[in-house]
Amino acid sequence: MKILIIEDDAEIRDVISTAFEIRWPEVSLIQSTTGKEALSVLETQHPELVVLDLGLPDMDGIDLLKDIRIFSNVPVIILTARDEEKDIVKGLERGADDYMIKPFRQLELMARAQALLRRAHQLNQSSTDTYREFRFGQSMHSLFIGNREVKLTTTEGAIMAHLIRNGEKIVPFANLAEVVWGADYAGSHEAVRVYIRRLRMKIELQPESPQFIHTHPGIGYSLNASNGTNSILT
């Protein structure tokens, strides 16, 4: 298994590398200090996970993440000193699967990385989960709504699969957070909202007036595939 660390600060790279080498020695680490180099590594070496700093010398990490998502669903953990809500939301909206603030705890980074990789492995398998017009293709990165195919990231796929399994039952925020991150941590409810917004942008014909993913204020979300389905079959 290969993990790509995109970080220009040598001291932080050493901290991350040491944590993985001690607690996860079977992992092969690849290090990149620029966005351009990282893109080349992703296209040629296909790592299973990316740890991404946003303050790179040649480009903003958010722009790099946007470029990555053009051709890859590789799980991405943003690890950055940017702690403002707008930066966190922007990172998640661009397709990050998790967002951690520096300084970080090594054990927490290991736990989140392992949980994300387990989820990614599950999503690469085929799924028989269906709900009315919703079904998955050869993996849970590929969602079909009728005959229309939508590509999902690892976190989007995990959330959508859980909603499909529950059908019209309301899924609480905390439950979705546990599915995605393994725990309901501070800020996770807002992160779930961001991913739901991303899902709506992909599956809804009118995201501002969602027909399929329903919000239950203060509680969570549920699926309703009974309205408007015929209009998206092709």
Image (cartoon, helix red, strand yellow):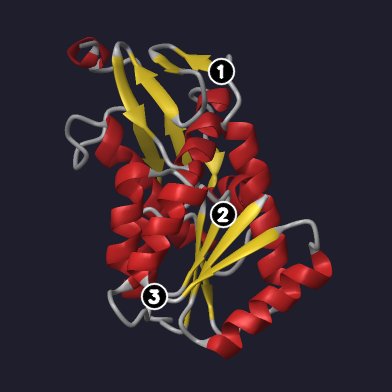
| Residue at image mark 3 | 54
Which percent across, then down, holds residue 76?
Answer: 49, 57
| Residue at image mark 2 | 49
| Drawn side of residue 10 relative to residue 135, left or right | right
The residue carrying pointer 3 sits among few (fewer than 14), some (14 to 19) or many (20 or more) residues within 10 Å by Cα, namely many
Which percent across, then down, holds residue 10?
Answer: 55, 87
Q: Earlier in the sequence, mark 2 or mark 3?
A: 2
Q: Amino acid at mark 3?
A: Leu
Q: Nearer the viewer, mark 2 or mark 1?
A: 2
Give the total number of marks visible in the rendering: 3
| Residue at image location 53% in from the left, 30% down from the top | 161
| Residue at image mark 1 | 129
- SS under mark 2: strand
Q: CA distance from mark 3 to mark 1?
A: 36 Å
Which percent across, then down, holds residue 133?
Answer: 38, 12
Q: CA distance from mark 2 to mark 3?
A: 16 Å
Q: Earlier in the sequence, mark 3 or mark 1?
A: 3
Q: Amino acid at mark 2?
A: Leu
- SS under mark 1: loop
Viewer-proximal residue among 85 and 110: 110
Q: Nearer the viewer, mark 3 or mark 1?
A: 3
Instruction: Inspect this view and state whether residue 107 appears.
Output: no
